[in-house]
Structure formats: structure tokens, C-alpha cells
Amino acid sequence: MYKLATRALHLLAAEEAHTLTIKLLKLGLGPVSSLQTPELAVDVPFDGGVLRFANCVGLAAGFDKNAEVPLAMVRAGFGFAECGTVTPLPQDGNPKPRLFRLTEDAAVINRMGFNNAGLDIFAGHLEHINAHRNGAVVGLNIGANKDATDRMADYITGLKRLWGLGSYFTINISSPNTPGLRALQGKSHLDDLLAQIAETRSALMKATDVNCPIFLKIAPDLSNGEIEDTVSSTIDHALDGLIVSNTTLSRDGLKSPYAGEAGGLSGAPLFELSTRALKVAATAAAGRLTLIGAGGIASGAQAYAKIRAGASLVQLYSAMVYHGPGLADAVRRDLVMRLKADGFRSVSEAVGQV
């Protein structure tokens, strides 16, 4: 039924299909998984505790921008759902059309521009669902408004407003669709931002006696040296990990007539580029950070490749455009089979085992 629904949604423009999907999920019309995969459970340590992920296959940010359906996606089989990106103030994002299916390439190009309803509505949704979370891991991806005069301050605002409402935070400085945002990945800017994040986190911990992991999401287009610098800065400022990676500006080898559209490319063409970046990050981190592998995952084989490259957890999103919401279970089944075939009792045993 859900495969048929996915095909039907392709009769609509990409953004219309996405909006309808969120509405259907809010009505309770999403799939409900009964698949048990204890081999895929992951514990992520952080200062003051351990965050338990029921399974390592997560939903990447961008699908649920306003934290409306994270629990529906966990019920569909995802081990965690990352909401956002949310900015302090509501913003419409870039002009439409801004989302394109590249069917010939099993890819998506988006130039959404952090369209979202703002922190207050986002926080209200989280406050409502938290009474029913039952241990579900919900990540909060925070960003900066396009017209902010102090973008670093926007991240601090987001951290403060949402503290205690989610399972972990992601600092998104790598979207290509907000002009100038990726400049924050430069070492001097990054060190300044992460120092402010660390200071704010420490103050919030003291005030609330609450802590959670904080991840930094990076672009796949960074050079090896830039990735190594980012790893060093992340460790120096006591963040807990990296998400590798965001979308790419590369257009190598695309066949679709939409290949020339501006924006970030995700889906199948991103897999090799993002996995290369992941391997560089894993080597540089040498076990000192938790890595989440994202980019181009559409199968258990690709999830397994990310894990063997150094990721403890993986995320997907664009592949659902083509495979539907049942993809989470399909990836998990395949991943368990591959782990057992290689003699691993748990996914954690396979991390970084090239």
C-alpha cells in the first residue's frame, strides 16, 4: 500500500507531495513497524550519561522541519528522527520551485533555504509530543536566519530555547542554501562558534542539571585538511560528534534535465563523496567522536558501508522519495543479515572495521 502511495505522490510536484505526506502522517496514516533488531541498538556516551538509540538507522533533518511527526517516523521503524532545521524566527525560505526530483539519478536537488515556522512553534510541538515519547530519540537541528545580523547568536538562541526538549542537538553550518552560512566552517569562525556553544552548554547544564549530545553537521565538499581541522575543533570544544554529511554542490555525472538547478544535491550521487569525507573524519577522530554517516543511503549495503567506514549511526531521507517510508525496515533487515554474515554480534562491533 505504501509503495503505491509513494508512486501516487510522484504525480504531484515534489514540495506538494512532501506537504501532503506530513499531513497524512499527522493523521496517523503512516506505517507501523513491528521489526525487532536488537543487534542494531547503539549507546552514545556524553558528559553525564549515555543516549540509547533503539536502532542505528535514523531519519535525517529536512523531512520534519517543524517537529510535527517525529514519533510517526520512529513508529515507521527509524531508530531516531532529527527535526529541523529550525531558525529563531519564522522564515519562508527561497522562492518556489525549490525542490526537484532527479529521477534518472535517484537524487534530489533542494534550495529550500531553511523554511520553517520558528523556534516557538517548534518548541510547542516538542512540548506536546514529549509526554508520549517513551524513550524515542528525537534530534533537534538548529540553524541561523538568512537575514540575521549575528548568525552565531542565532545558534545560541536555538540552544537555549530548546534545551531539555530533545535527545540531542545538531549544529547545522553546512547548508548551501543560506548565502554565506558555509563560511562558518572556516577554522577561525568555527572555533569562535564552538567556543560559544560550549560556554552556553556549560551554563545550561549548571542551571538545569540536564545535558545531551551535540553534533556538528558538515559539508561533503570540504578538503581532507578542512575535515581534519573540523575534527580537531570539535574535539577541542568538547562536542560529541559529527554528522557527515550535508548535501553537495557537485553535479558530476548527472543525467537529469534538472541537473543544472541551484541548490544542494542529495541521494545516490552523494554516496561516494560523503563516504570519502566520513573516512577522513573517522581517521582524524580516532574514536574520540561519535560519527553519524549520511548521504546517499538507500540500502542495507550502503548503510553497512558507512558503518565500516566509521559511523556508529546512519541517516537517510532522499531515498524515501523513491522507496517510500518502508525503507527503514528494509535497510534494517539487510543490515542485520550483513552483520551476521560477517560474524558481528552487534552493529557497534562493525564500526570502522574496514
Image: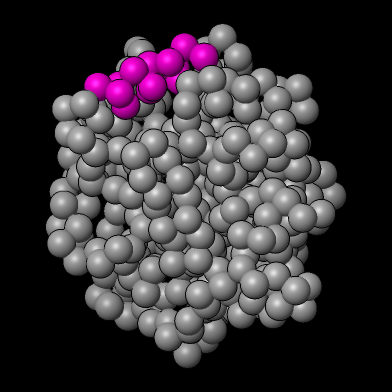
Residue 346, above or below 265: below
Residue nearer the viewer, 79 or 108? 79
Residue 215, above or below 180: below
| Image: magenta residue range | 191-203
How many numbered marks are there?
0
Residue nearer the viewer, 153 or 79? 79
- Is residue 199 within the magenta segment? yes
Residue at image position (77%, 78%) is 341
Left or right: where does residue 310 sit relative to residue 145? right
- Is residue 320 within the magenta segment? no
Q: Can residue 103 be seen in this view?
A: no
Left or right: where does residue 72 sit relative to residue 280? left
Give the image location of residue 107, x and y in percent.
Answer: 67, 57
Residue at image position (52%, 86%) is 4
Residue at image position (51%, 60%) is 42
Give the image location of residue 24, x and y in percent.
Answer: 32, 74
